[in-house]
Amino acid sequence: MGANPVPAVVPIANVIPPFTPSGVLPPYLGADPTAMGAMSPYRVTLTEIVQRFSQTPERRTILAGFLAHRASLLGFGVTGIQWLDGSFLEDIENVSSRAPGDIDVVSFFVRPPAYQRNNAAWDAFWRGHMAVFSAPMAKVSYHTDAYFVDVEFGAGPVIQQTAYWFGLFSHKRATGLWKGMLEVLLDPQQDDAAATQLLSTL
């Protein structure tokens, strides 16, 4: 008997879906959770995130910090993909009567060219910029609970880390509720400038 075929990816509009009755983003769109293209994380733009999640002063402060954190990473030459999660992506004000405290972000990143295949140099650079790369420090400085997966480590560790973060980010820690998350590109061509400009007008 042959191997099972890889499920076909069903293209679906990358939009931020409405909250479920539980106040979270749905873990998939439509009626079929096996359709790969309909599964969270949903790739969106930064402008869409600002438009959807900037309704309170607390949220605008968090967004400004998140965009500033991205600016630091891009300024270093760090690129990749970011998964966004946490109470910031939930209807936390109505469900729990509180504001979000930060935004949870894991970056699957590519090192700047000068540090690729040079672990010692990259480690020294990393340690020299802990305000950006340390989760506790980034939370204070940027309102961003920032974590990182270095793709330079290769397929095995990256797969292990991806499984860990997907499992953690796709469920509420207290209840185990399955939920969705968002994905944005960490790239100089992304719409950071437009999102920052939009946020400044709100």
Image (cartoon, grey):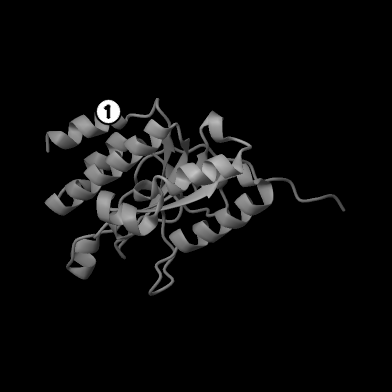
Taking the spot 56% from the left edge, 53% from the top edge, the residue there is: 162
* Quadrant in which the C terminus is drawn: top left
**As drawn, 145 above or below 71:** below
Tell me: 177 left or right of 93: right
User: What is the x, y in percent for residue 122?
Assistant: 53, 41
User: What is the x, y in percent for residue 103?
Assistant: 31, 54
Examine the rendering and report whether any part of residue 9 can be seen: yes
Quadrant in which residue 118 is drawn: top right
Q: Give the mark count.
A: 1
Mark 1 residue element: helix
Examine the rendering and report whether any part of residue 170 can be seen: no
Taking depth in this image into account, of 138 and 19 the one nearest to the observer is: 138
Tell me: 160 left or right of 99: right
Taking depth in this image into account, of 120 and 108 the one nearest to the observer is: 120
Circle 1 crowding by C-alpha within 10 Å: few under 14, some 14–19, many from 20? some
**As drawn, 38 above or below 168:** above
Question: Disc 1 marks which residue?
Answer: 193
Residue ranking furthest to the bottom: 175
Taking depth in this image into account, of 190 and 96 the one nearest to the observer is: 190
Residue ranking furthest to the right: 1
Residue ranking furthest to the top: 189
Taking the spot 43% from the left edge, 36% from the top edge, the residue there is: 185
Quadrant in which residue 15 is drawn: top left
User: What is the x, y in percent for residue 65?
Assistant: 25, 45
User: What is the x, y in percent for residue 71?
Assistant: 33, 35
Tell me: 72 left or right of 8: left
Taking depth in this image into account, of 144 and 82 the one nearest to the observer is: 144
Taking the spot 34% from the left edge, 44% from the top edge, the residue there is: 16
Q: Three-letter amino acid code at disc 1?
A: Ala
Quadrant in which residue 42 is drawn: top left
Taking the spot 48% from the left edge, 53% from the top edge, the residue there is: 31
